[in-house]
Image (spheres, rainbow, N blue to C red):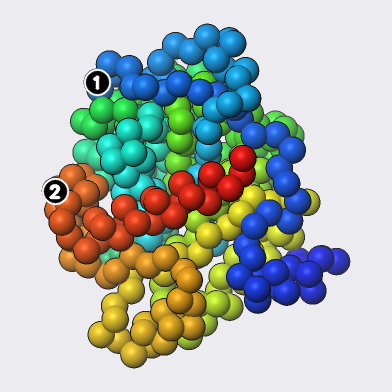
C-alpha cells in the first residue's frame, strides 16, 4: 500500500510535513463570491471570464477518514458554517454519505427521490439538487439513497477525475466546497482525494493517534500518485482523560476540537454550534480550525 515512496513519506510525516507529495497541477480557479441573494439555493451566475480567472482562491476541502464515527460529518457541517457565516465565503456543503448527516444537521429532510448519483452520471446538473440553508451564502448538495451505489457507478463510468471536474465546475459559484465523506477506501475516496485541495482527518485521541493518522496518509498515498496536504485534527478531545492529554502532548501542533455536549446538541438544534452557542469552547475551536485551514490554503499560492 505504501509503495516505493514509503521511507520518504514516513520521514515527511515524522517531520510534521503533511504537504503534497507533488504540487497539484490543476486547481479550480475563480474570483468574486461576494454573496448573492440571501437563502437563494444554487451557485450564482458567474461569467466565463470570471470562471477562467487565475486570481481566485477557490478550494475544495474534504473531511475524510477510513474510520466511522470520528466526527467527519460534525466537522463538515460546522466548518461549512464557519466558512459561510464567519468568513463570508459562498460555501457548498456536499454530502457524499448516503446517511445524509450533513443535511440533517441543517434541518433539511431527506429526499425520497434517488437523484444524487445522476449528478455523477451527468444526467442532472448539481445545481438542480442544491438546497439553500437558513444561513446566507451556505448551500447543501444533499445525499440520498442512490449514493450507496456511487462507488460502483464511478468505477463503471471510468472517469477518474469525475468528482474533480464537478467540483471545479461548482467552484464557479462557490469559494469553498466542503465534502462530507463516508468512511470508505474505494474509488469514491480516491476521487475525493483527486478533487480536494486539502484533506482534514479527524482523529479521536488515543496513544495510537499518530499511527492512525499515518495509516490514513498511507492509504491516501497508496491510491494516488500525488495528493493534497493532509491536516490531522484531534476530535472529541477530553483533557480530563489521561490518554487524551497524552495524545495532545504527543502531537502539540495538531488542531483540536474538544469533546463537548454543545457539539452533540447540534443534532437537537439542527444547527452548527456557532449558530446557537457562539461563545462555547467548541464553537471557538471550530473557528480556530477554520483559520488554520484558510492559512494552509493560502500557502498554495
Ligand atoms: N466534539 C464532539 N463532542 C461530542 N460529541 C461529538 C463530537 N464530535 C462528534 N460527536 C458525536 O460523535 C458522533 C459521531 O460523529 P459524526 O457523525 O460526525 O462522525 P462521522 O465520522 O461522520 O461518522 P460516520 O463515519 O458514521 O459518517 C455523533 O453522535 C456526534 O454528535
Ligand atoms: Mg458522517
Q: Please tell me whether mark 2 sits on a helix, a strand or a loop.
A: helix
Left or right relative to 94: residue 273: left
Considering the image in quadrants, where does the N terminus appear?
bottom right
Observer able to see residue 94: no
Q: Name the residue under label 2.
A: 276
The reply to whether the residue tagged 2 has its Cβ within 8 angstroms of ligand 1 is no
User: Where does the image place residue 21, in percent across and percent down from the top left?
Assistant: 73, 56
Residue located 62% across and 18% down the image: 52
When the figure is inspected, residue 285 is found, relative to residue 85, above or below; the finding is below
Q: Is residue 80 visible?
A: yes
Circle nearer the N terminus (2, 1): 1
| Residue 163 left/right relative to 6 | left
Q: Is residue 79 above or below residue 210?
A: above
Which residue is farthest bottom?
Answer: 242
Packing grade of label 2 (10 A; few <14, some 14-19, many >=20) is: some
Residue 66 is labelled as none
At x 61% / y 44%, what residue is drawn? 300
Q: Residue at x 45, y 35 (%)?
A: 176
Is 97 placed above or below 165 here?
Answer: below
Which quarter of the rendered picture does the C terminus lie within?
top right
Label 2 and label 1: CA atoms lie apart by 20 Å
Mark 2 and mark 1 in contact? Answer it, CB < 8 Å.
no
Q: How crowded is mark 1: few (under 14 residues within 10 Å), some or many (20 or more)?
A: few
Image quadrant where residue 163 sits: top right
Q: Where is residue 210 in the image (x, y as percent from the top left)?
A: 55, 77
Q: Where is residue 109 in the image (x, y as percent from the top left)?
A: 25, 35
Residue depicted at x 61% and y 54%: 229
Mark 1: secondary structure: loop
- Mark 1 — residue? 38
Residue 8 rendering spot, x and y as whole percentages:
78, 69
Amino acid at each position: 500500500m505504501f509503495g516505493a515512496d514509503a521511507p520518504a513519506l514516513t520521514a515527511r510525516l515524522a517531520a510534521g510535513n503533511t504537504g503534497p507529495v507533488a504540487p497539484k497541477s490543476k486547481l479550480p480557479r475563480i474570483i468574486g463570491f461576494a454573496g448573492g441573494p440571501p437563502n437563494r439555493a444554487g451557485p450564482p451566475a458567474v461569467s466565463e471570464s470570471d470562471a477562467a480567472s487565475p486570481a481566485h482562491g477557490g478550494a475544495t476541502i474534504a473531511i475524510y477518514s477510513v474510520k466511522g464515527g470520528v466526527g467527519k460529518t460534525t466537522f463538515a457541517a460546522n466548518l461549512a458554517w464557519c466558512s459561510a457565516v464567519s468568513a463570508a465565503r459562498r460555501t457548498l456543503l456536499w454530502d457524499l454519505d448516503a446517511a445524509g448527516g450533513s443535511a440533517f444537521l441543517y434541518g433539511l429532510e431527506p429526499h425520497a427521490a434517488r437523484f444524487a448519483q445522476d449528478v455523477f452520471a451527468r444526467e442532472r446538473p448539481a445545481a438542480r439538487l442544491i438546497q439553500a440553508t437558513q444561513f446566507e451564502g451556505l448551500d447543501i448538495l444533499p445525499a440520498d439513497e442512490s449514493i450507496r451505489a456511487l462507488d460502483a457507478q464511478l468505477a463503471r463510468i471510468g472517469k477518474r477525475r469525475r468528482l474533480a471536474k464537478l467540483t471545479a465546475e461548482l467552484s464557479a459559484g462557490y469559494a469553498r466546497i466542503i465534502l462530507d465523506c463516508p468512511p470508505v477506501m474505494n474509488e469514491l475516496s480516491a476521487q475525493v482525494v483527486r478533487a480536494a485541495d486539502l484533506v482534514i482527518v479527524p482523529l479521536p485521541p488515543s496513544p495510537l493517534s499518530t499511527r492512525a493518522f499515518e495509516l490514513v496518509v498511507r492509504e491516501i498515498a497508496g491510491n494516488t500518485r500525488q495528493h493534497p496536504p493532509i491536516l490531522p485534527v484531534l476530535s472529541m478531545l477530553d483533557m480530563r482523560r489521561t490518554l487524551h492529554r497524552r495524545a495532545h502532548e504527543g502531537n502539540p501542533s495538531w488542531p483540536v476540537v474538544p469533546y463537548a455536549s454543545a457539539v452533540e446538541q447540534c443534532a437537537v438544534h439542527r444547527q452548527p454550534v456557532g449558530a446557537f452557542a457562539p461563545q462555547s469552547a467548541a464553537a471557538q475551536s471550530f473557528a480556530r480550525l477554520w483559520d488554520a485551514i484558510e492559512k494552509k490554503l493560502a500557502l498554495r499560492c
